[in-house]
Image: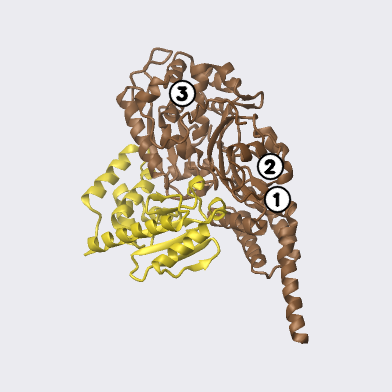
């Protein structure tokens, strides 16, 4: 039985039009911002910390802690929203921006107040033109209503006017912009290539000023915390490590793909696929599930009872990441699946770090050779060796991500790889037989 | 041929939006491409000059970002996602059928394929990039528009009819 849960991030499942300001305010929208402005900025940060909100973009870093790293004092500070949603299987931020733009804007406003930012940027992937247009319209609405602007009509706890402008910026096609320092580089007008750290963005980020980069869904969680309080937020989910709601993306071999908002830690992967996704269209058993797009190890069918939260998915040998679940039934050849995923990473490697640039190319070449029936059993060792040379040796996580489809598929589905080699041997035998005839 | 006054004004407005003018480079290149269809060496130089940046900065971006084109592209550009979520539910088949309906010969290997109609008005691409429409797969992008749920032959017939209408419009505009 599906959970009895009223969604708060995407409260209108199936809706395709944007929620306008009046409708948003009728359901209590911007109450969180008004509550925040009655408090000291540092108290807002403390509330978000106490609520246990973790970044929803993939890394799961505590949001309040990230805000607290921004130095106090004068000078510009920036809040940058990472809306470069490009992970295969991930489409939650798209819905949030297209349907609930004011929830994001309110989250940006609260975050900006907490860190002392007066100019925030939303970096949206270039293909999301509808999301960009709707968010711009919503920003204009909020400005006209006096909720945003330099200054706005709202007043801060210290009696000064609340001042914030939001710039909506569309990228131009580069997965690597999902990495926060590459995103900052792109926003500065450069090629999107990750920076070496330290310094971290909280100290020297956009234009070398203190910067916080938060994911869309992360910020969309913030208004509820400020409007309803820490305890109400913590009542959703599975505290202490897994509080709040989460939007899970479901795609691949399921009858009902889509975005599903659920409390963290209340549903197992099996329940999610069967009760929410309707199971596989073919009726065939699930062979494996990718829980974080193509960037985390595949979860084999034996681990489908893992609970959907940070700890549960970690316990199943993978990571929750962006919570983008790609389901594969037992008709899938995992060598083919790994090849398709590695093609993505080879294509999207920015080229800055040699292990990633060269390594993804060699992974792809080796997998192609195997797919063409020219592989050897030693290719499995080559794939693992190359993966080892990439992982941990690059400036950003793309290199690590590129290796996980390969290493996890070899680990759990070695027979799929060997089947290609066996087929060749059989072919060779047949040729031999013919020659003997 | 230089950029129109409208585009040049839009680029000037972009520069005014940001604390540092270089941030305006990427959106400005997109504005120029919207008018010209692609970014020639001359257009790149003009955009850089308008913002007050070295030409090399414009070239750096144009040769890095997938949505910027430094070679001419067809007026109707179709990009099918062939990444895993789409590929699992028939994207390869949808691409092949679309190519057949348009009489396009596809070249390239595995996740990356391309071809064009004989009149060069429609380009068809299979890509490994995900466009964030996995719940409405298979899908493709036609220019900036998303075409989703391309599940049946009827869906593909409708898509191809739309592509031909767009191609005819582009042809008449060119004349």
Q: Is residue A404 left or right of residue B157?
A: right
Q: Is residue A15 left or right of residue A249?
A: left
Of mark 1 and mark 2, the one earlier in the sequence is: 2
Q: Quadrant of residue A414?
A: bottom right
CA distance separating discs 3 and 2: 33 Å
What residue would you read off at disc 1? A408
Q: Would residue A117 be visible to someone looking at this image?
A: yes
C-beta proximity under 8 Å, tags 1 and 2: yes
Label annotation for residue A318: 2
The lab-note entry on whether marks 3 and 1 share a chain reads: yes
Hue of chain A?
A: brown
Label annotation for residue B134: none
Label annotation for residue A110: 3
Residue at position x 61%, y 34% from top? A60
Of mark 3 and mark 2, the one earlier in the sequence is: 3
Rendering coords of residue A21 (x, y %): 36, 26
The kind of secondary structure element at disc 1 is: helix
Q: Quadrant of the C terminus of chain B?
A: bottom left
The front one of A377 and A337 is A337
Q: Would residue A206 be visible to someone looking at this image?
A: no
Rendering coords of residue A229 (x, y %): 54, 16
The kind of secondary structure element at disc 2 is: loop
The kind of secondary structure element at disc 3 is: helix
Q: Is residue B157 above or below residue A250?
A: below
Q: Is residue B167 left or right of residue A283?
A: left
Residue most extreme to the bottom: A437
């Amino acid at each position: 039985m599906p959970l009895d849960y009223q969604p708060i991030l995407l409260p209108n499942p199936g809706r395709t039009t944007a929620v306008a300001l009046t409708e948003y305010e009728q359901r209590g929208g911007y109450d969180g911002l008004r509550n925040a402005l009655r408090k000291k900025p540092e108290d807002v940060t403390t509330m978000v910390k106490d609520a246990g909100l973790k970044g929803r973009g993939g890394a799961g870093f505590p949001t309040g802690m990230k805000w607290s790293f921004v130095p106090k004092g004068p000078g510009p500070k920036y809040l940058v929203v990472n809306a470069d949603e490009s992970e295969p299987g991930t489409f939650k931020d798209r819905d949030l921006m297209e349907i609930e733009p004011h929830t994001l804007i309110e989250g940006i406003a609260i975050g900006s107040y907490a860190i002392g930012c007066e100019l925030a940027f939303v970096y949206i992937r270039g293909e999301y033109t509808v999301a960009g247009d709707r968010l711009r319209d919503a920003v204009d609405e909020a400005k006209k209503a006096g909720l945003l602007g330099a200054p706005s009509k709202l007043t801060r706890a210290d009696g000064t006017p609340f001042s914030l402008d939001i710039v909506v910026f569309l990228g131009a096609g580069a997965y690597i912009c999902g990495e926060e320092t590459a995103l900052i580089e792109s926003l500065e007008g450069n090629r999107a290539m990750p920076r070496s750290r330290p310094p971290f963005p909280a100290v020297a980020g956009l234009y070398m000023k203190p910067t916080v980069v938060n994911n869309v869904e992360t910020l969309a969680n913030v208004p509820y915390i400020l409007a309803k309080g820490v305890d109400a937020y913590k009542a959703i989910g599975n505290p202490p490590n897994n509080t709040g709601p989460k939007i899970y993306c479901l795609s691949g071999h399921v009858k009902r793909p889509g975005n599903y908002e659920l409390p963290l830690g209340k549903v197992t992967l099996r329940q999610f696929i069967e009760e929410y996704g309707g199971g596989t269209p073919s009726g065939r058993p699930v062979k494996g599930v990718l829980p974080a797009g193509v960037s985390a190890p595949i979860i084999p069918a034996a681990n489908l009872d893992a609970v959907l939260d940070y700890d549960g998915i970690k316990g199943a040998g993978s990571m929750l990441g962006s919570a983008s679940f790609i389901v594969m039934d037992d008709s899938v050849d995992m060598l083919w699946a790994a090849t398709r995923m590695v093609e993505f990473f080879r294509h999207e490697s920015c080229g800055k770090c040699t292990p990633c640039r060269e390594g993804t190319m060699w992974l792809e070449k080796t997998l192609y050779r195997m797919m063409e029936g020219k592989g050897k059993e030693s290719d499995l060792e080559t794939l693992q060796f190359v993966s080892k040379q990439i992982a941990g040796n690059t400036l950003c996580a793309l290199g690590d991500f590129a290796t996980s489809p390969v290493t996890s598929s070899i680990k759990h589905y070695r027979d799929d790889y060997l089947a290609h080699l066996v087929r060749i041997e059989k072919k060779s035998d047949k040729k031999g037989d013919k020659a003997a005839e | 041929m230089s950029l129109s006054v409208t585009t040049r004004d839009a680029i000037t407005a972009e520069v005014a939006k940001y604390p540092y003018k270089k941030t305006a480079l990427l959106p400005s290149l997109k504005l120029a491409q919207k008018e010209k269809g692609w970014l020639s060496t001359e257009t790149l130089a003009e955009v850089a000059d308008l913002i007050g940046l070295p030409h090399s900065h414009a070239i750096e971006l144009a040769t890095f970002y997938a949505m910027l084109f430094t070679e001419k592209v067809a007026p109707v550009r179709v990009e099918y996602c062939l990444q895993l979520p789409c590929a699992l539910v028939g994207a390869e088949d949808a691409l092949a059928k679309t190519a057949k309906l348009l009489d396009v010969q596809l070249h390239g290997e595995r996740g990356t394929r391309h071809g064009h109609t004989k009149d060069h008005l429609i380009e068809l691409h299979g890509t490994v990039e995900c466009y964030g429409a996995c719940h409405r797969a298979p899908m493709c992008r036609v220019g900036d528009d998303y075409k989703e749920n391309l599940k049946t032959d009827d869906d593909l017939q409708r898509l191809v009819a739309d592509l031909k209408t767009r191609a005819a419009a582009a042809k008449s505009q060119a004349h």
